[in-house]
Each structure stands twice: as C-alpha cells, then as structure tokens.
Amino acid sequence: MQVNKTKLAGVLIIQPKIFGDSRGFFEETWNKARYEAIGIKGEFVQDNLSYSTKGVLRGLHYQCPHAQGKLLSVAKGEVFDVAVDIRVGSPTFGQWEGVLLSGENHRQLWIPAGFAHGFCVTSDTVYFTYKCTDVFTPEAEGGVLWNDPDIGIEWPLGDVGLSDKDKVYSRLKDIPQARLPKFSEFGG
C-alpha cells in the first residue's frame, strides 16, 4: 500500500495494493494492523454507503462533539472528495485538500476527526463508502457552506445539486468557535 501525506496534517491519500487478472481484481480495503502502522488508530463503529447521481454535492459536514474520523472510498463511479481543517487553533485552519476517488483508481482518503467533509459526484452515478470512528449524532451535526469564499474550494462542477440544509450552512468565520472542534483535542 502506498500512502501520501497532504498539506493538512493527518489527512492521507491511500493507494491499496490491487491484485488483478483477467477474472477481475482483489483489494484489501481495511486491515487494522496495516492501517494502524500508517497512523490510522481508533475503532470504526459505523460503516456507510451513499448512492448519488452526477452533480450532487454533499457537505461540508462535521460533528462537534462526537467528531468522526472517516476512511472514504468509491466502489463504483467517481467523486471529488474534500477535507477542510476546522479545528480551532490549527495552523492550517480553513484550508482544504481535495482528491478524486473512483472505483477505477481505488484510492482511499483518511480524514481524521476534527475536519469537515464533503464530496461532489463527477460520474453519472456513484456508490461511495466510508468507515466512521463515531456514530452519527443528529444533535452534534454541523456544517460549513460548501462554497465559502474564504476557504475557496475549487469544485470541479459549477452546477451542483444540494440538500436544503447544505444550501444554508454558515461560512466558517460565522460559526461560533464553541461549535467547532479544537486543535488541542484533535491533533495539537
């Protein structure tokens, strides 16, 4: 497995080994010992599968408290996946990292707890999977406006489909710091 660090400390792009032949392929998507060796520690407690169509944008979501670390991958299709550092006190606060994940490139993205997450579907359809280190907790749910100009994410599609909730999230600068994760808890 190949691991690439990003400009956001702790956010990793992982390229698992693929064993393929004329019959298809085999990929190990999770191995506790191997992933702990690259710094992904903690217990996964929830697995999610998301199906979406082209142009759907989901995010930027986070939980505080009950922050979730997420190991993300695509079974079929393609997404532009984004992590945003929203940890108050972080040297990279408000910065983002994006990567194309697809069923063809087999990449995974590890986003540690304390970051906001979003993705945009760039294929006709996508089956998007993620393992989480904490369960979904509605009362802890938060979000950052997907097109916050201070963050400046370069989404690959201009016309996107958003949920009503995602359309009205606040800019990062307008979210009270008490509603954001602290760098001292998640990486400091």
Image (cartoon, rainbow, N blue to C red):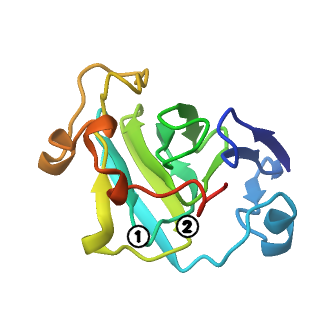
- Say which element carries label 2: strand
Q: Quadrant of residue 158?
A: top left
Locate residue 94 relative to residue 164 in the image: left or right. right
Residue at left offset 51%, top offset 57%: 182
Please state which amino acid type lies under the numbered disc 1. Answer: Pro
Could you tell which of marks 1 and 2 lies nearer the N-terminus? 1
Locate residue 45 relative to residue 35 in the image: left or right. left
Whether 147 is drawn above or below 187: the answer is above
Name the residue beneath numbered marker 1. 65
Q: Quadrant of residue 53?
A: top left
* Closest to the observer, 175 or 36: 175
Locate residue 79 relative to residue 22 in the image: left or right. left
Count of number-bearing discs:
2
Residue 131 — which label? 2
Whether 105 is drawn above or below 130: the answer is above
Please state which amino acid type lies under the numbered disc 2. Answer: Lys
Percent coordinates x, y for residue 84 in the rendering: 49, 40
Residue at left offset 39%, top offset 65%: 64
Locate residue 52 relative to residue 94 in the image: left or right. left
Percent coordinates x, y for residue 9 in the rendering: 69, 43
* Closest to the observer, 188 or 170: 188
- Say which element carries label 1: loop
Percent coordinates x, y for residue 137 in the rendering: 33, 75
Distance Cα–Cα, label 1 vs label 2: 18 Å
Q: Quadrant of residue 49?
A: bottom left
Residue at left offset 31%, top offset 69%: 140
Whether 99 is drawn above or below 156: the answer is below
Residue at left offset 37%, top offset 73%: 136
Q: Is the C-beta separation of discs 1 and 2 under 8 Å?
A: no
* Closest to the observer, 136 or 91: 91
Mark 2 surroundings within 10 Å by alpha-carbon count, few (fewer than 14), some (14 through 19), many (20 or more): many
